[in-house]
Image (spheres, grey):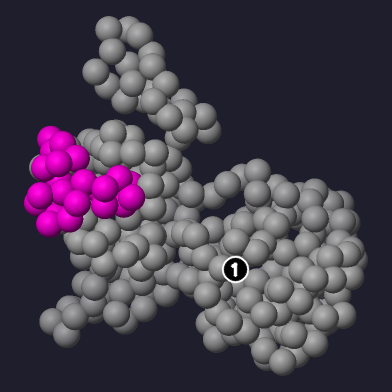
């Protein structure tokens, strides 16, 4: 028996030349999915996750009962754990885990410590940055991305809300789109965000950027924008959260920042912003080029000779 993936559709088990559909395709590997959902799991579900991280190969041969005993939880918790991270049950989870483990991966510890050399740190940050992009690409819902680009192209005004590090991403997103003639704006002050949201119209779009999707100020402003009929787009980490639940369109990232925040979250967020910018630019290609030519000429004119 072997596993194959029919792109964008389903996992297929192939046995004796016969194909059998075993469920909707899980868009990330099991281990990546667990990491994304970990903070949202219950304490007992986190015990299951911890055991799986430490005994991945063994889990492939465990029954539900065996995993429950070894994780010191009930069998019902195992089922809830699988469902919490997006699987129908333990069988589907093991199929995804098996696929994870048969793909050879080079392991480079990403946690920075005091004994690391300059080269060690450079390697870890490089690995973390590349992994952030690769993992985020693996979970992108291209239909949602296309919807986001479509509503942005049609909107009268698009506003980006973010605070802290997410505020920097909001500013970058606004600047990218503004360079190709999109009426985009960014707001990082919670009060101004709320004032702006209250005055939006149905023809406008509000994008809330929050890595965990739980920033109260962003959620408050998006709720106000929702009330006036604006389209809501979320950009958050990949798991169920209040902001993505509220949004009309969800854009997700995958990231695992360590204690010294190597910047993986920022890179994954910017990766999605880059994709959105490129898709919008492509949809209005000639107009975007004209805008960029004007912007570039201004840059030339302002250079010191």
| Residue occupying image coordinates x 82% and y 66% | 230
- Tell me the quarter of the picture where residue 288 sits: bottom right
Q: Is residue 9 left or right of residue 119?
A: right
The residue lying toward the viewer, choosing from 54 and 131, is 54
The residue lying toward the viewer, choosing from 70 and 253, is 70
What is the quadrant of the C terminus in the image? bottom right
The residue lying toward the viewer, choosing from 132 and 40, is 40
**Residue 63 showing in the rendered view:** yes
Residues in magenta, as a range: 61-82
> Mainly helix, strand or loop, the magenta region?
helix
The residue lying toward the viewer, choosing from 128 and 246, is 246
Q: Can you identify the residue that label 1 sits on?
A: 243
Does the magenta run of residues contain 189?
Answer: no
Q: Is residue 180 above or below residue 54?
A: below
Characterize the local packing of mark 1: few (<14), some (14-19) or many (20 or more) Cα atoms within 10 angstroms. many
**Residue 170 showing in the rendered view:** no
Measured as percent of width and height from the top left, residue 195 is found at 80, 87
| Residue occupying image coordinates x 84% and y 52% | 284
- Tell me the quarter of the picture where residue 234 sits: bottom right
Measured as percent of width and height from the top left, residue 137 is found at 49, 50
In terms of secondary structure, where does tag 1 sit? helix
| Residue occupying image coordinates x 65% and y 64% | 246
What is the quadrant of the N terminus in the image? top left
The tally of labels here is 1
Q: Is residue 295 above or below residue 27?
A: below
Measured as percent of width and height from the top left, residue 4 is found at 36, 25
Measured as percent of width and height from the top left, residue 249 is found at 67, 56
| Residue occupying image coordinates x 73% and y 85% | 193
């Amino acid at each position: 028996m072997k596993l194959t993936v029919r792109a964008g559709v389903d996992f297929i088990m192939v046995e004796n030349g016969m194909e059998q559909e075993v469920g909707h395709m899980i868009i990330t590997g099991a281990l990546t999915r667990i990491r994304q959902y970990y903070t949202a799991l219950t304490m007992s579900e986190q015990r299951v996750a911890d055991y799986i991280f430490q005994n991945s190969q063994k889990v492939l041969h465990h029954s539900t009962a065996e995993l429950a005993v070894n994780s010191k939880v009930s069998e019902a918790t195992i089922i809830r754990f699988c469902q919490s991270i997006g699987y129908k049950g333990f069988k589907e989870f093991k199929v995804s885990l098996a696929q994870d483990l048969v793909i050879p991966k080079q392991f480079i510890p990403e946690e920075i410590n005091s004994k690391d050399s300059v080269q060690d740190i450079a390697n870890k940050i490089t690995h973390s940055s590349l992994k952030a992009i690769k993992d985020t690409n693996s979970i992108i819902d291209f239909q949602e991305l296309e919807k986001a680009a479509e509503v942005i192209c049609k909107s009268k005004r698009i506003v980006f809300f973010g605070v802290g590090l997410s505020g920097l991403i909001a500013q970058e997103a606004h600047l990218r789109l503004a360079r190709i003639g999109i009426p985009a704006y960014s707001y990082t002050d919670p009060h101004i965000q709320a004032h702006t949201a209250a005055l939006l119209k149905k023809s406008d779009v509000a994008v809330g950027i929050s890595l965990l999707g739980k920033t109260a100020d962003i959620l408050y402003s998006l709720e106000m924008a929702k009330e006036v009929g604006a389209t809501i787009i979320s950009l958050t980490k990949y798991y169920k959260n209040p902001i993505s639940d509220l949004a009309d369109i969800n854009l997700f990232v995958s990231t695992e920042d360590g204690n010294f925040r190597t910047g993986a979250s920022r890179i994954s967020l910017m990766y999605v912003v880059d994709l959105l910018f490129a898709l919008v630019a492509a949809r209005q290609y000639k107009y975007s080029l004209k805008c960029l030519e004007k912007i570039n000429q201004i840059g030339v004119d302002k250079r010191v000779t």
